[in-house]
Image: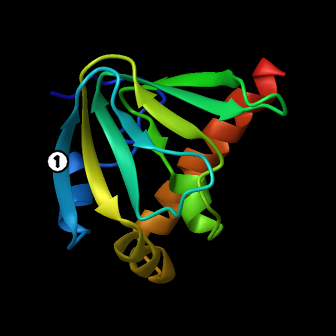
């Protein structure tokens, strides 16, 4: 179910340990073409991608869709927006059948407010993502 990559959210964290940290969690399979969430909608869940690919896109000023990036196994969708208490900054559409581990945003925020190893892990994950974005620009 999970394809391990070096930029994976599991790179520094055991999956079972991660599962145990959340009360409101579920596994979901999004079929190809299904919209996971829309730009500017409230962030109610974050998605840990276990397998598959998701296109992240935005509407431009002409109301045309522009691709932002493709996320795959090991990526987390909605994480930054949830942490910053914003609406989704993009839309997400499954490019192929995609398995995710979904976590309620309130559950994530409760965990982030605790002082444990998850906070360090979250900072490391976000740092790696920001570094990758910086290298792309």
Q: Residue at x 22, y 70 (%)?
A: 24
- Asked if 12 appears above or below 96 in the picture, the reply is below
Q: Quadrant of residue 130?
A: top right
Q: Quadrant of residue 137?
A: top right
Query: Does residue 53 appear in the picture of this structure?
Result: yes
Viewer-side residue, 26 vs 38: 38
Where does residue 105 sit, x and y in percent of width and height?
A: 41, 68
For this view, does 55 lie left or right of residue 45?
right
Furthest residue toward front: 62
Picture colour scheme: rainbow
Secondary structure beneath dot 1 equals strand
For this view, does 108 lie left or right of residue 20?
right
For this view, does 29 lie left or right of residue 8?
left
- Asked if 36 appears above or below 82 in the picture, the reply is above
Where does residue 42 sit, x and y in percent of width and height?
A: 52, 64
- Asked if 38 appears above or below 110 in the picture, the reply is above
For this view, does 14 lie left or right of residue 93?
left
Identify residue for label 1: 27
Where does residue 84 sit, x and y in percent of width and height?
A: 65, 67
Classed neighbour count for the residue bearing mark 1: other residues with Cα under 10 Å, few (<14), some (14–19), many (≥20): some
Q: Residue at x 35, y 22 (%)?
A: 33
Q: Quadrant of residue 72?
A: top left
Viewer-side residue, 105 vs 39: 39
Q: Residue at x 54, y 46 (%)?
A: 125
Where does residue 50 sit, x and y in percent of width and height?
A: 27, 33
Q: Quadrant of the N terminus?
A: top left
Q: Residue at x 41, y 54 (%)?
A: 46
Query: Does residue 16 appear in the picture of this structure?
Result: no
């Amino acid at each position: 179910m999970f394809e391990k990559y070096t930029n994976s959210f599991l790179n520094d964290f055991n999956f079972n340990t991660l599962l145990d940290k959340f009360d409101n969690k579920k596994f979901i399979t999004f079929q190809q073409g299904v919209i996971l969430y829309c730009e500017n909608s409230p962030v109610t869940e974050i998605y840990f991608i276990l397998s598959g690919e998701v296109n992240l896109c935005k509407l431009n000023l002409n109301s045309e869709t522009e691709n932002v990036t493709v996320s795959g196994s090991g990526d987390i969708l909605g994480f930054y927006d949830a942490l910053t208490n914003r609406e989704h900054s993009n839309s997400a559409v499954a490019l192929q059948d995609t398995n995710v581990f979904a976590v309620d945003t309130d559950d994530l925020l409760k965990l982030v407010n605790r002082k444990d190893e998850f906070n360090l892990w979250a900072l490391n994950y976000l740092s790696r993502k920001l570094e990758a974005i910086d290298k792309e620009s």
